[in-house]
Image (cartoon, rainbow, N blue to C red):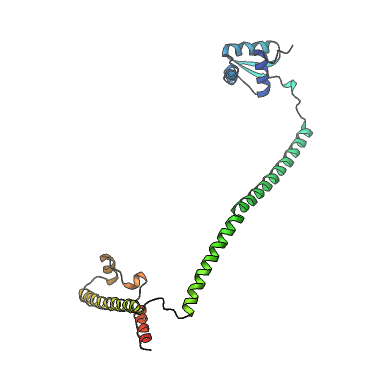
Amino acid sequence: MAPKSDSVEGIVLTFVNEQNRPLNVQNAADALQKFNLKKTAVQKALDALADNGQISFKEYGKQKIYLARQDQFNIPNAQELDEMKKQNAELQEELAAQKKATSEVEAEIRTLQSNLTLEEINSKQAKLKSEVKEMEEKLKKLQSGVVLVKPEDKKAIEDSFHEKVNQWRKRKRMFKEIWDAITENSPKDQKEFKEELGLEYDEDVGVILQSYTELLNSNKKRRLS
């Protein structure tokens, strides 16, 4: 007669059948702690179930190994196993298709979430209209001949630029004279010597004096015309 499901033997029998693998008393006791069953109670229940023929057991020295009776399970034959494998493969394909569909939906949701709301679109449109209006006003001033920079301010800027370019040219010439004097009889390679001193030419940092000189000459021509 099968033990009641809520009795100690009933709980242990259900556990052994559900696991359907070799177990010793310690395995069972550890797993059944959630039922507040002590190891001695589990051992007693296992032995009783084994004696009643409700579970199988084998002795290995002083240790007993318990196992669910296999004759209670419906073991599939070769044909049934093949059918189960086929069903499993079909389920795997269906699962993959579902995952793909889920990914596509999630991607679409992310795209929708990244789009601007109507309120954000209206706000952006208002800002752009304001910027366009401001630029149109500036354009009208330029087209009407309004002077945006005072002549005296423009002259001061040009004079300052002229002075800076001239100073640059003088210092560049002074450096070249000093450098030529130092390296004239030096056995060192000039490029290596320059790197050793940490020196950089204008060209090394992408600056060319000639382009600024041409800009200066262009300003002079505009003044004379």
78 vs 27: above or below? below
Quarter holding the C terminus is bottom left
Q: In this view, does 176 lie above or below 78?
A: below
Residue drawn at x 47%, y 76% is 141
Q: Residue 33 appears at what percent x and percent y?
A: 57, 18
Position of the N terminus, as image quadrant, is top right
Determine the image quadrant of residue 35: top right
Q: Which residue lies furthest to the bottom in this view?
A: 225
In the rendered image, the vertical position of residue 117 relative to residue 174, given as above or below: above
**Relative depth, front residue between 37 and 211:** 211
- Residue 28 lies, in percent from the top left, at 60, 19
Q: Can residue 115 be seen in this view?
A: no
Q: Which residue is drawn at 59% across and 59% down?
A: 122
Could you tell whether 93 is left or right of 153 in the image?
right
**Left or right of 63, for residue 49:** right
Q: Looking at the image, which is closer to me, 30 or 136? A: 136
Q: Where is residue 215 in the image (x, y as percent from the top left)?
A: 37, 80
Camera-side residue of 207 and 200: 207
Q: Position of residue 46 (x, y in %)?
A: 64, 14
Front residue of 156/26: it is 156
User: How many tags in the picture?
Assistant: 0
Task: Please identify the quarter of the rendering in which residue 79 is found.
Answer: top right
